[in-house]
Image: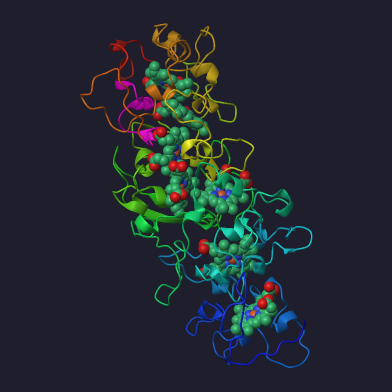
Amino acid sequence: MKKLIFICSTYFTIGWAGGIYAESGTFKSSKHADPGIGVHRDTNLPRGNCSQCHLQHDGDLPYDFALFAPADNGTCLSSGCHDYQYQWPPGDYYWSFPGNTTDWYNSAHGASAGQFPPGNGRQVALCVQCHDPHTAGDSIHGVYPSATRELEERGCYSNGAIVGQGCHGMNGSTRPAGADDIYSQLLKSSRHNVEASAKEHSTDWQASYPYGRESRQVNSGHFSDSNRHVECVDCHNPHKAVSGGHQIGSNEIGGALLGAWGVQPSSAAPGATPTSFTAVDFNTIGGSLEYQMCYKCHSYFAFGNTAPSGYTDNAREFNPANASFHPVQDTIPTNSYTIQTPENGLTQTMDNRWNNIVHNKMTCSDCHASETATDPGGPHGSNNPYILTGSPAATDIAFCTSCHLGLVYAPPTRPIGETGSRFDGQTTGEEDASHYFHVTVRGIGCRQCHGGRQEPPPAQPEQRSPYPLDAGSAHGTNTLVGLMNGANISAYVPGNCTPTCHESITYSAGPE
Ligand code: HEC
Ligand code: HEC
Ligand code: HEC
Ligand code: HEC
Ligand code: HEC
Ligand code: HEC
Ligand code: HEC
């Protein structure tokens, strides 16, 4: 088709998915059509008019749909509209398109040779694969934000009305080559529920709020209360993401998060909640840290001092000034026997994936991901509570021993010689003051001693009844060193332990 005749100033009827829609379609309410900010490629023609993109001639025109440029990505990019020059300043808001043609062609989507639907569809790499320049919508949700063809996450995993059968859907035969099945993760008992909200991330845009984006200001209300939500595009930027997970032992992002953003907390006193943050754009992998993205929704930045029920301020827990923590923000300051010293010799205490010579850092998604190691990485969903790779129950040890070697922390037989741990019969000088005796012989779970509570226990209730596990307590604590904030620990200093199970005991502590 090379001919299109347009009647100026009258909008054609443009359908939306699922049937032809009454007069004017959704185009009229789109950013492209807006008389204030709409398309203005040709300044002799009215802003936002059809003729800005479709030439109005009754004759042979060189390009399909009578477009002013070839009907491919050139219409959007080389026209000067969506290249770097046109990038809108994000200011206090986030605007997802990097506006950089090179970034686009290097991205997993822009570089894809795949088609959707596979075999007989259009190229994945076309802007119009995901966007409809006229916009789309439905009668319940109105215009879809950002002129996408489908409502938000459905564009990632659905095919029109057929939910879960799209590019990141559950059916291998409808996924373009190289695309992971994310939809199946979202059906699990614990997940980021991306379907729970619509148009929270990008509300209908207004001239006074032109980016239609979330604020990057602390506790703005855009991530809390009724605006609390999560979508694929909160964590991913489809124009910049490249494939590949993060490097184990590092807290930097994997390529899948390129182009997204997060927040860096300023330093805070031990045990304190960080209350000021700086926005960080994930332009390169180096220097972009995964936790920064999570803090956008799981810290004071999102909800101030009032965490949603059942949730805690994760930036407070991982504060590197705390007495102990998992090394998400910074390496741990104490000797976990993964550093070689004259005292310990070097015994490997971590699984091989981790560096046993230097202190590691880690990402949130090292612990929060599918229970099945061969599934795609990332905190999409798991059959364990809290999107964990293993069960967080107090008596379960498998989750912890997926990283901390079972041979050291749950040795099947009494170890001969040092295990490399600080809590080891050879080091403490007491056969029973050891992981072997407690975990293997007495069947005590890791979280009965480590990572079970946020705060010191109250003077009452009586000992011998474990304190309940507090959410987030495995992350970090300022209560005690060595994450000795377990559900059965009343007090601990290296060399002296007061559990709820027996009298306080004293032994020689290994070097910290
Ligand atoms: C921002 C540029 C732009 C504007 C403004 C625009 N279009 Fe289009 N239009 C396109 C592009 C690009 C295509 C090709 C879409 C594709 O390949 O899927 C297209 C395709 C079409 C088609 C072919 C069938 C289809 O829907 O894909 C029709 C009809 C059409 N446009 C009508 C209109 C009308 C009527 C207006 C004004 C109400 C309008 N367009 C405004 C860019 C635009
Ligand atoms: C794989 C799907 C996909 C492809 C292909 C794609 N985009 Fe997007 N684009 C999206 C999604 C999803 C959003 C919404 C992001 C958000 O809300 O953060 C978006 C947002 C945008 C925005 C911001 C719109 C606004 O509301 O301010 C622009 C501009 C944009 N895309 C342009 C393009 C251009 C130009 C191309 C081709 C070079 C392209 N996109 C290719 C999925 C895609
Ligand atoms: C809460 C944040 C979050 C949400 C929501 C989210 N993801 Fe992810 N996703 C991640 C993280 C983090 C990774 C990278 C994990 C890594 O580096 O190992 C990832 C990885 C991926 C990967 C690459 C997997 C691999 O192993 O290469 C794909 C594809 C993906 N996500 C798609 C999606 C889609 C589609 C959605 C929406 C249905 C979605 N994600 C929602 C955080 C998220
Ligand atoms: C845009 C906001 C947002 C971002 C970014 C985000 N989350 Fe969430 N997260 C949520 C919301 C909202 C929930 C509540 C469950 C729901 O409604 O999906 C949640 C729930 C969770 C849960 C508990 C799930 C359960 O079953 O109880 C975990 C764990 C979690 N997020 C981890 C992460 C990690 C790790 C990251 C970073 C890689 C992250 N989140 C980034 C919004 C976010
Ligand atoms: C060493 C493993 C580990 C790491 C690393 C980790 N988590 Fe968790 N997380 C857990 C466990 C275990 C729970 C279960 C809650 C409990 O029983 O304490 C949990 C619970 C949660 C919850 C739900 C309860 C709450 O406190 O809000 C969220 C949200 C969460 N984690 C987010 C994160 C974020 C964000 C990061 C990175 C900044 C992270 N986690 C890093 C192990 C981890
Ligand atoms: C995904 C891997 C992973 C999982 C799962 C994990 N950890 Fe860790 N843990 C680490 C890393 C990495 C370090 C830091 C090691 C180093 O660099 O010295 C660490 C450090 C620790 C420390 C020393 C903290 C300090 O400040 O001295 C303790 C105690 C600990 N973990 C206990 C646990 C317990 C208990 C569990 C299960 C609830 C658990 N870990 C689950 C990776 C993990
Ligand atoms: C009876 C209580 C107890 C139990 C149960 C226990 N630990 Fe420990 N663990 C300790 C003590 C005490 C230390 C020394 C802490 C310190 O002084 O920093 C320690 C230290 C550690 C450390 C820090 C590095 C090191 O080896 O010194 C890690 C990691 C660790 N334990 C993991 C585990 C894991 C994994 C489990 C479950 C398989 C577990 N622990 C069960 C008491 C316990």
280 vs 95, nearest the viewer: 95
Question: Along the line of sight, which residue is nearer the eye, 420 or 200?
Answer: 200
Above or below: residue 9 compared with residue 125: below
Count of labels shown? 0
Q: Which quadrant of the figure contains the C terminus?
A: top left
Give the quarter the ligand 7 occupies: top left
Is residue 489 a member of the stretch shown in magenta? yes
Of helix, strand and loop, which mostly describes the magenta segment? loop
Assign the N terminus to one quadrant of the image.
bottom right
Q: Residue at x 52, y 56 (%)?
A: 260
User: How far across and down, in percent of the image, does residue 467 sit?
Assistant: 31, 26
Question: Vertical placement of 432 versus 396: above or below?
Answer: above
Q: Residue at x 61, y 43 (%)?
A: 376
Residue 293 in sight here: no
Give the image's coloring scheme.
Answer: rainbow
Using the rendered view, name the quadrant where residue 206 is placed.
Answer: bottom left
Q: Is residue 464 visible?
A: yes
User: Looking at the image, which residue is at 62% across and 73% down?
Assistant: 19
Relative to 358, does residue 316 appear above or below in the rendering? below
Does the stretch in magenta take in 414?
no
Relative placement, left or right, of 62 versus 129 is right
* x and y, in percent, of residue 12 in the image: 62, 85
Q: Position of residue 193 (x, y in %)?
A: 49, 50
The image quadrant that residue 210 belongs to is bottom left
In-image side of 499 versus 60 (left or right): left
Magenta segment boundaries in residue numbering: 471-491
**How far from the left and from the top, in percent, is residue 89?**
47, 70
